[in-house]
Image: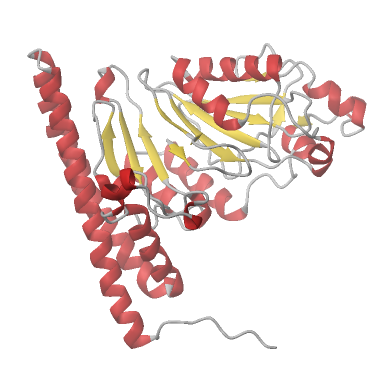
Amino acid sequence: MNYSAFAGFPAPLTNGGLNEHHVAGRDVWSPSRDELGKMTPNPQTGLNYSDLSRIAMERATTAREAVEIVGELIDKYGYATYGGNSHFFADADEGWVFLNFAGGQKLWVAQRVGPDEVRVSRPGYIGEIPNDYRTHPNFRGSANLILFAVEQGWYDPQAGKPFNVNHVYGDGKMRHPSIELIEDRLTEKAKHGKVGLVDVMRAVRTTEVTRETAGYGQVAHLRKDVPVELGMLWVAGAPSSPAPFIPFRLGVTSVPPEFQRHRYLSEKEAASFQDIAQRGIESTRYAFQVYKRLLYLVQEHEEKFLPEVTEALEAFESRLIEDQGFVEATARALYDSKQPELARRFLTYYSQTEAMHGLQLAESLAQSIEARTKVIFGIRSLEPKAK
């Protein structure tokens, strides 16, 4: 998953995604303590979060290997940051939360999330870790992780308290109450059965998680013994409260023009005229813009309009989920009969078609809600500034 420039880093920036080994990754905001931000060298050296994510996706065959790759890169080259960040890597067996900190000290730590555990990372966080974190099967970290904190007076090993990563190196807040509620709800469900695909989609769609800053939504459906090209990532092309999740398998070769890069929100585009080479794409609707329009309409009167939008999106996705048995069986039959190109064309046609159906649904919802907003509430305008 690539997106445009952010915080001075050059585009395109890689946020994660799903690779051919069915390792999934997602970059997640995670702030470092103020003192680390202030001691960050200028200019910085080392890899940024986008570099780390891209390299891990290019090389890792398991989530654990992704952690090892990123940790070794920071150990060797350092980490350039805008204030701290994190990654979540997962495969069909386990997940790993990986925190990288500001300060230019090559500080990092990772914690395993097992198959019976739930973690909602917003922001990414890690709490208490054991002293043997470097050899413990459920933890990894830089050699100086605890020592540097002791040297700075941020942690006293003689106090008899365990080393809490978030309290020592983060903002100390751990989970936001709304995020804690989502995590606890999913954890409780996991105690009485499995957390399924729909449960995760609903969690990602929760408005506390999917504010406009979320950018887009993705849910990796990770399963064992699945052929490479049938690995599946459900993608919402904007914050997922107004955008449906569309299934894209690794065998898909392209997306509709409406879902490709448009000028909207691209850096410095407003100061230039249209590039002729880009004109064809620009003549199409832009899915991201359509979804953002629906987002703004819903946010203006959320109590009234959010339930009906959520109901429509979930009904649409429910049909897609039901389709997947047929889609996978058809693709497997084509691969098994040595017709991989036909399989890819089928998968591409299916995902492109459903992506356009989802776009049309969002446009229809937006048109209806806009009409009713004008009649019931009126369109709120900017108040003139007092002189």
* Above or below 326: residue 305: below
Q: How many labels does the image show?
A: 0
Quadrant occupied by the C terminus: bottom right
Please indicate, yes or no, whether residue 216 appears anywhere in the rendered image.
Answer: yes
Judge from the rendering whether residue 373 lies leftward or rightward of residue 38; answer left or right.
left
**Residue 64: x %, y % from top left:** 52, 17
Front-most of residues 163 and 287: 287
Judge from the rendering whether residue 383 lies leftward or rightward of residue 376; answer left or right.
right
Quadrant occupied by the N terminus: top left
Q: In which quarter of the image is residue 123?
A: top right
What residue sits 21% from the left and 58% below the top?
360
**Residue 301: x %, y % from top left:** 43, 75
**Residue 60: x %, y % from top left:** 47, 16
Judge from the rendering whether residue 232 lies leftward or rightward of residue 72; answer left or right.
left
* Above or below 118: residue 296: below
**In this figure, which colouring scheme has been used for the structure?**
secondary structure
Q: Quadrant of residue 311?
A: bottom left
**Residue 107: x %, y % from top left:** 74, 25
Q: Quadrant of residue 104?
A: top right
What residue sits 17% from the left and 41% below the top?
322
Please indicate, yes or no, whether residue 211 appears anywhere in the rendered image.
Answer: no
* Above or below 25: residue 21: above
What residue sits 53% from the left and 41% below the top?
120
